[in-house]
Amino acid sequence: MRYNEISHFSHPQHKLKFECNEMPFKCDGCKEAGIGSRYKCSICDFDLHAHCAIPSPSIYHPFYTKCSFLFLSRPAGDKPRYCNACERDVTGFVYHCKSCGFDLHPCCAKLPMVLDDGEVKLYLYRNVSSSCNKCGRKGRSWSYRSTCKKYNLHVACVKDMLAENWQEVYFGRGKSRTMESRIPSLKNSQQIQHKKSRGKVQKYSEIAGLAVQVVISAVLGDPTALIAGVIGSLISRG
């Protein structure tokens, strides 16, 4: 459900308005990067992913059928926590299962089970035997894999690419108002492995590029064709 304006417990001073633009941002709820749709306070430069702004009190996930994840505004306990989907640290809003101790970032918890932009269809897996086209390893975090099984991208690898290229977002060196460009070029995102003959490499590179765009969009909390296209245009320039 989407509202044009909301009040939020994490920012009681002002109302947050829904907006969508191509400027990346750091979510003040989960502390992760975002792009596209968000709830924003224009006075304080306060931003929330839609998933963080309007969370579910509790969720169930098909990968953890025996777990019940409760929404928390801060990590449980006093020890470092990490997301079981992307393996990155949990420092803000989180879905936590008290019985098993699993944690999920709100955007990771809401990752679509299927991504389909009309050119490539990708399915979300908890464990997959295929090697990641980015890192070449198996079994690291959740993965999106194509129907043909030729393309497999770890959610962790996508976040690593973002962390490497968007340091000002991830490490708090400035929020969206300080960025010179809408989206920094993801210079390493096309360095993926191919096993096809030389004559087919170009076509497979194009398909893999689409896969990267769609997965990045989903990880950032906005799996839409519009945002994927914006990211794709910048990837091609990188």
Image (spheres, rainbow, N blue to C red):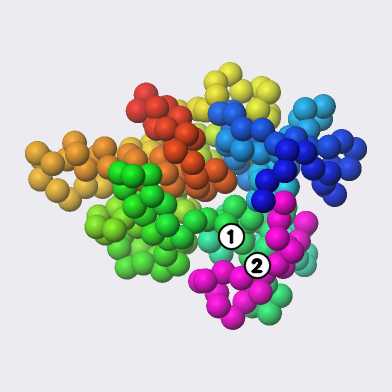
Could you tell me residue 122's position as x and y percent?
36, 54
Judge by depth and name the residue closer to the eye, 211 or 50: 50
Front label number (2 vs 1): 2
The reply, left or right, for residue 199 in relation to residue 208 is: left
Residue for badge 2: 59
Question: Which residue appears at 34% of the width and 52% of the height?
Answer: 121
Quarter placement of the C terminus = top left
Q: What amino acid is at disc 1?
A: Ala
Q: Is residue 153 left or right of residue 203?
A: right
Is residue 137 in view from this perspective? no
Residue 32 in percent (x, y) is at: 63, 45
Badge 2: residue crowd in 10 Å (few <14, some 14–19, many ≥20)? some
Depicted 194 relative to depicted 63: above or below: above
Return the x and y of residue 28 as percentages of the image width and height: 73, 42
What predominant SS class does the magenta segment belong to? strand
**Which quarter of the figure has residue 132?**
bottom left
Tell me the SS state at disc 1. helix
Disc 1 marks which residue? 109
Magenta includes 205? Answer: no
* Boundaries of the magenta span: 54-73
